[in-house]
Amino acid sequence: MIFFLIAALFFNLFFFTSSSFASAYSVYENIEWLNLLHYKKRYSKYESEVDGKDFFFSNEGKTDSLKELQATIENFKRDKYLACKFPARFKWLKAMGIIKFPFLDKSEKSDSNNWCIKYFDFLERMHTESVSVVFSSYYINNPASTFGHTFLRLNKNKNNQTSHQATKADELLDYAINFGADITTSNPIIYALGGLSGYFKGTFSAIPYFYKVREYNDYESRDLISYELNLSAKEIERLLDHIWELGHTYFDYYFLSENCSYHILTLLEAAKPDLKLTENLPFYVIPSDTIKALFLNAGLVKNITFRPSIHTRFNNSLKILSKDEKKILQKILKNNNPDLIDEINLINTSKVKILDSALDYFDFKYFKKLLKGDNETLKLKIPYLLKRGSIPIASSSIQLPETDEQIQYKLPNKGHGSRRVSVAIAKTGSGMDYSKYYLQFEYKNALHDILDKVDGYPKNVSLNIGIIDFRLGYDQTHKYDGKFYLNKLQLFEILTLNPLNEMMLFSSKNSFWYPSWGGSFGYKKVGNYYSLIGFDGSIGLSVNLFNENILLYGLLNFDLAFDCSESKNFMPGVGPVLATKIDLNKEMIIKISYQEMKYFKNGSALNIYDSSFQLRWNTTKNFSLALEINSINSKERSFPMFGLDKLKSAEYILRYLYYF
């Protein structure tokens, strides 16, 4: 009798183990399993992008999906409460018929099992009706957010309203799911190198959405654009379960690849396996590109909402004021006395517009102080609040929101491709001692310059990463001369123009302004004489004219470079840059610039002059044509666009640009 019992025991154990392994072997390369464990194919085998060891049951789970699946099955059957730690995994195995017993009911949680208590509490707090991907607009002043940021918003059910029907105030009750690096240093060099090498841990966190609104919308003046996704209730359930699973592990964080935006997409692929979000991304991942990836999956995005920053709200409130109303606003702010508005014969609707603009001004200029409860700042604002409260007219009936057209051009999915390649034909003028043709090529990894089509990108900002520009020379008979000319090889180029408006300089006490600035690092050709490698920076002012169709700016440029063409000497330089950008319409843009640089080398000063005329025709979203006329006699002042003799000695470039 004992013999038969032992035999039966061994048979059941063998059968149970064999059937589990057989089931695992049949599904270990299933896309749903691979997505839940974040396996990606590296050369010929799969490897998980999760780096926390506690995410895996098998010691070889990071690199072996089969062994991890087998270990997962064994552990779930050994301890049913592990389902509360990895609910998405358990439910998938249950749906595949590999695990037979049901998932734990909420009533089964007990004080003896901490994972189940926390898991069900997490679901209650999230209470998610729908899910949105939120794009926080570009923030050039912070290197980590220069290209924008994305995160998830878990939209709660607000009395059976859809996300589209919910008000801006209702949104504050939602939760944000953020993936970010756990920064452990304040040293900028370690910060940069650590971010590029995966030194920092990247983790998921769930925080109330109003914290994100305060951080991005208010503190950093960044617009928030929400893309509500078309997910089923089952897919939302799996998403929440997987967020919970990832909440207690980490990834190595890479600024260029495995960053905030990339892992938001992998999270969505785990929830909805038929999505193709990451497979066509380049090796570096830009938030705007991940938004575009959403639209490559038909029907995924079902609604878009826009939440303007305090900067945007302030600018909009100025735009609806008449010229006389702006003067009144300047007067009451200059004197810090809202009662002055009663001394002028105005209808109440005009008073409301002026006072609302004044309050937006205070929120924009003094947000940090107001957030900290600074008494002096509060004393300045309270009289305006009291005066505004005395007029019983709702602001919403006066200050209209941005039009659909104004919002559309800010949507990153409307923008051109982040990478750009261009091919050009260049010719030196006949007035030179020689006349030569060039075939010129340029490539840049990212992102945008001020002459590109502005839709989906920050206006008046150039942000270019990884640029190479070279040309091949041809003689007058159009025969290749066998020479290669490198014009530019740069790690980055940045130009941020912050135009002043009429509210920024009217009073020494209330004035505020943001400088325009720029910088670049790498190799560049200066005129026809010098090849420099190093860093240059610039700072100055810019101003908009004629309804923002003309932009004027002046910068003081500093160049810290080495001359790599001759003696390899240090060759610093300094000089002014003057330029204007003219928007003829949305497609055609003109830029005229002039620069003087004084370089110092071996105790002597060298003057370099550069002037140019550029016409850009952005024919479609991803195609452009450009005409450029540049001075090349750079040792004396030269304006090629003025005078026939100057035009004869200029360089002409016809360029074709493609964005992808």
Image: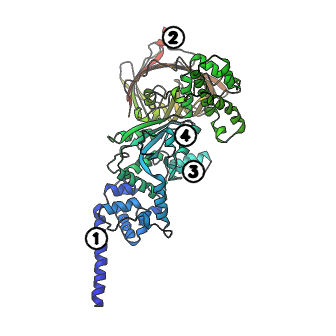
Q: Which residue is mark 1?
A: 19
In whole angstroms, how far apart are the C-alphas of marks 4 and 1? 52 Å
Residue in the picture at 41% in, 45% down: 160
Left or right of 1? Residue 137 is: right
Left or right of 129? Residue 638 is: right
Q: Of the residues shown, which amino acid type is indicated by label 3?
A: Ile
User: Is the residue 425 above or below the residue 244 in the image?
Assistant: above
In whole angstroms, how far apart are the C-alphas of marks 2 and 1? 85 Å
**Mark 2 burial class by Cα count in 10 Å: few <14, some 14-19, many 20+:** few
Q: Which residue is mark 2?
A: 642
Q: Nearer the viewer, mark 2 or mark 3?
A: 3
User: Is the residue 332 above or below the residue 202 in the image?
Assistant: above
Q: Earlier in the sequence, mark 3 or mark 1?
A: 1
In whole angstroms, how far apart are the C-alphas of marks 3 and 1? 46 Å
Q: Of the residues shown, which amino acid type is indicated by label 1?
A: Ser
Q: Earlier in the sequence, mark 2 or mark 3?
A: 3
Q: Which residue is mark 4?
A: 216
Q: Secondary structure at mark 1?
A: helix
Location of residue 262 in the rendering, given as x and y in whole percent from the top left corner: 43, 46
Left or right of 385? Residue 592 is: left
In whole angstroms, how far apart are the C-alphas of marks 4 and 3? 19 Å
Q: Secondary structure at mark 2?
A: loop
Can residue 485 be seen by looking at this rendering? Answer: no
Q: Quadrant of the N terminus?
A: bottom left
Q: Of the residues shown, which amino acid type is indicated by label 4?
A: Tyr
What number is the disc on residue 183? 3
**Mark 1 burial class by Cα count in 10 Å: few <14, some 14-19, many 20+:** few
